[in-house]
Image (cartoon, rainbow, N blue to C red):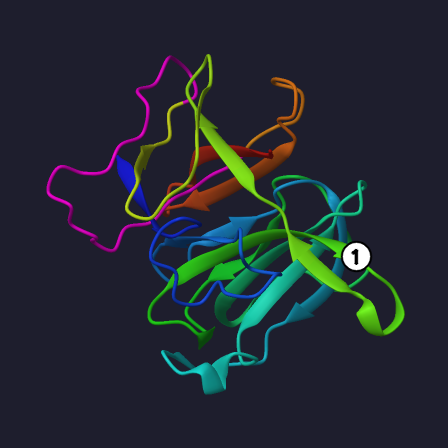
Amino acid sequence: MAFMVSQAPGGVVSTHVTRETLHAVDFAMPEGTPVVAAREGVVIAVEWRHAVGGASRALLDKGNYVRVRHADGTIATYAHLAPAGVAVEPHEFVAAGRVLGYSGATGFASGPHLHFAVTREVGSGDAAGEISEPVTFYVGNPPVAFTPRMGLAVTAEYSSPAAAPATPKTGAMRRTFPEYGARRGLAPGLAWLFALLFGAAGTVWFYRFSRR
């Protein structure tokens, strides 16, 4: 089964326009899909109280999210989670693969999807902020690396060699949902893990990525 990237760098970008989101990637998926930790770390912030979402910038600060700081100082943000869809608390240590919450469409969102971004803190004082870091995904064993782009259909296959992802011949941007993950140490520079569980049977699919 293949899944679509609904927003990524280099494509038609409608919401990832700040330095914190320039390299963020969106994956369309049904509401209520469990979202798990990319890497182990400490939860530094959560929001679960919002219940509305829509294609209005007035809702930019109305989305639910979980943020996890990793040992190297980078921060992973999992956003647009469902109302009351957060399963962790601030200051809690989470292992890779721990369920953080459930996908939704809260905040500035035209439909259910997961917004995933990796950022690093820069500056100090009034100049303090965060910048996003690019990620490279890979599939298959041995891994086939690829750059995420809008409309890319990816089949999560890690037990055997996999074909490189490709844009569907129909060009249809249908609403689909990805599940993804990784582990450290597979190759130089591959450092990110993100796994998404889906379905009542608890099937696990993986996407893998790293900083460039």
Residue 51 visible at all:
no
Tell me where residue 111 appears, x and y as whole percent: 33, 68
Tell me where residue 66 appears, x and y as whole percent: 63, 62
Q: Give the position of the N terminus as an image quadrant.
A: top left
Q: Is residue 89 left or right of residue 110?
A: right
Q: Give the position of the C terminus as an image quadrant.
A: top right
The reply to whether the magenta stretch includes residue 58 is no
Tell me where residue 42 appears, x and y as whole percent: 78, 52
Q: Is residue 40 left or right of residue 127?
A: left
Tell me where residue 170 appears, x and y as whole percent: 10, 43
What secondary structure characterizes most of the magenta part?
A: loop
Q: Which residues are magenta?
A: 158-181
Residue 206 visible at all:
yes
The answer to whether residue 201 is above or below residue 184 is below
Query: Which residue has dot 1 on it?
Result: 122
Q: Is residue 87 left or right of residue 92?
A: left
The reply to whether the magenta stretch includes residue 179 is yes
Q: Residue at x 52, y 79 (%)?
A: 60
Q: Residue at x 65, y 31 (%)?
A: 191
Total marks in image = 1
